Image (cartoon, grey):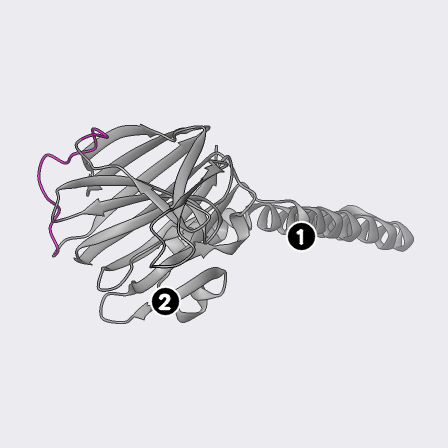
Amino acid sequence: MKRVKYFFKSYKTDFITAVFAALTAAATFRYAQDPRSKFWLSVIILSTSLLVIIYTRFRERDFVFSALTWRSDKESWLGYGLFELSRAQTAYVITNSEPGIIYGKCLAWSDYLFEFDFKIANVCLGIIVRAVNLANYVMLQINTDTNGIRPHIRVAGGWKWWEAKESKLELESPLSLDQWYKCQVVCDKNIITIRLFDGSKMLFDRIWEIPQGMLVFSFKKNAEDKQSVDIPFPITLEYGSVGFRNAGAEKVFVKNVLIQKL
């Protein structure tokens, strides 16, 4: 049903234009007396309708919906690991994906709502936002074992993370491995709002602020080298796409993905 709803929402202008053109053309042939007038009015109506449809096709939409219930839904997603349709769950399974999977058409988006349905099959769900690429993004890890959300920042492939308790992102009760939930993440400048729902019941509604400044990583030339070099990397995550990351045995099912500009 959601696929049908967002299909009509995506092509709403096209449908309205087509109906208007058909009604206007019918009225022209019904009431116009001069055959030449009928012809030229029809040409004008069809040309105007075509221009409106072309304009709406090239204009960037303010939302994207990916149901992730058909095999063809995979086409606009980029990344590595297992990301494919599970016919048993009628959703996409994500696992063994260390860098993650991101949606390729929203890389230049900044402030948006990211909403989807999910069921954790093993350990956790990794939610990616503000992904410039697969080496630079924010990840919110919903854990079933630690009963909370651990925010991560990935910069140049290196990780910095915070525990749920220190980030004040603890859950009151652990999520079930046997149940579907809805997640809603809102990115507004450097403020991220995270909401979790069980049906219509809200389970969680907290915010987390993306830290500013630099992350410093220590590097060694080789394993035997006792001395390391500290290299600072700026946190530049003002824009970027969304997606999911489940590394190793971590496993989750997702569907009904909505990305909408604020």
Considering depth in this image, is 96 or 229 the residue closer to the camera? 229
Q: Quadrant of residue 224?
A: bottom left
Query: Marks 1/2: CA distance?
Result: 48 Å
What SS does tag 2 mark? strand
Question: Can residue 135 be seen from the camera position used here?
Answer: yes
Question: Can residue 92 be seen from the camera position used here?
Answer: no
Instruction: Report the magenta residues as a range.
Output: 166-177
Residue 165 lies within the magenta run:
no
Considering depth in this image, is 138 or 90 the residue closer to the camera? 138
The residue that disc 2 covers is 81
Considering depth in this image, is 90 or 47 the residue closer to the camera? 90
Q: Which mark identifies residue 234? A: none
Q: Residues within 10 Å of mark 2 (few under 14, many from 20)?
A: some
Q: Which mark identifies residue 22? A: 1
Kind of residue indicated by mark 1 = Ala
Q: Residues within 10 Å of mark 1 (few under 14, many from 20)?
A: some
Task: Point out residue 194 in the picture as x, y percentages from the top left corner.
Answer: 29, 35
